[in-house]
Amino acid sequence: MDLLEALNTRTMVRDFLDKSLREEEKQLILESAIRAPTAGGNEQWYFIAVESKENIEKLYRLLVEAQRLYFNKMVKVPWSKDQIEKWEKKVETGLYRAPFYVAVFTDLRSRFYTRADVEERWAEQSAAAAIENMLLTAHGMGIGGCWFGVPLLMEDRFYDLFKVNRDEMRLVAVLAFGYPKQKQPPRQRKKGLREVVRSL
C-alpha cells in the first residue's frame, strides 16, 4: 500500500478480532512512532505498550468508563437512553477490546526551552505526529487502529494504571490496535477544502 492510498483509506476501527498481533507487527508500529517529526529534534515523547492480559483488561474497562462519561457529560447534547443502550450492547460484544494498546505521553523530564507553555505544546505536537505514524503504519499492514482522547476526562485513573508521574509525563491519548472484525470504508469529511482553507 503506498502512502496516498493509506492516507485515503485509513479509518478508525473500534471493533477487533480476538486475535493477537505478531511481535514484529507491534515492533513496526512502535518504531514508526519515533520516526515522526519532532519539535526541535527533542523527542519529548514516551510510549507504554500494554500487552499483558491483566493490564489489557484493566485498560479496556477504564476506556469504556471514560467513553460513557463522554456520552453523558462531555457532549453538549447527551446521548439518549436508546442510543446509550445500543452502545452498551456493542460494548458487551467487545467494542474497543483490542489485543494491543499504546499509551502516548509527552515526556517533560528534560526541558530545553525558556517558555514552558510553548515547549509543552510543541511536545504535544510531536506526540500527535507519532500517533499518526502509528495509525498509518498499522493500516498499511491491515491492522485497525483507534485514537482515544477520552482518557483525558478521567486522567488520574489512567495515571494510576500506567504508574507514571504526571508532573513528568502528560497523557496525550491511548491507541488501540487489532485486526478489524469487518472492513470499514473511510468516513466522508463533513467539510470540504473550500470551508477549511483560505489563501493569503
Image (cartoon, grey):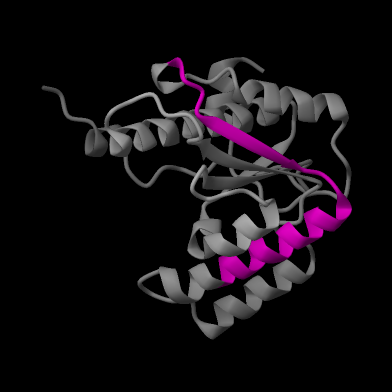
Q: Is residue 73 above or below residue 102?
A: below
Image point (74%, 31%), residue name: 142
**Front residue of 25 and 127:** 127
Query: Can you tell which quarter of the image residue 19 is in?
Result: top right
Give x and y (percent) for residue 35: 58, 17
Give the side of residue 101 with respect to residue 99, left or right: left
Name the image quarter holding the C terminus: top left
Q: Is residue 124 left or right of residue 30?
A: left
Residue for point 52% across, 50% down: 166
Tell me where the magenta segment starts and ends, as one range. 41-68
Q: Is residue 185 visible?
A: no
Q: Is residue 146 above or below residue 24?
A: below
User: Which residue does the image show at 55% across and 29% down from the upper left?
Assistant: 130
Q: Is residue 116 visible?
A: yes
In this rendering, would 8 be left or right of 31?
Answer: left
| Secondary structure, magenta segment, majority class | helix
Give residue 33's quadrant in the image. top right
Q: Position of residue 11 (x, y in %)?
A: 58, 40
Comparing 17 with 130, the one in front is 130
Residue at 62%, 30% in the rendered image? 134
Most extreme residue toward the bottom, as rendered?
81
Locate residue 191, reporting x and y percent. 32, 43
Q: In this rendering, is residue 58 above or below 40? A: below
User: Quick one: quadrant of the N terminus?
Assistant: top right
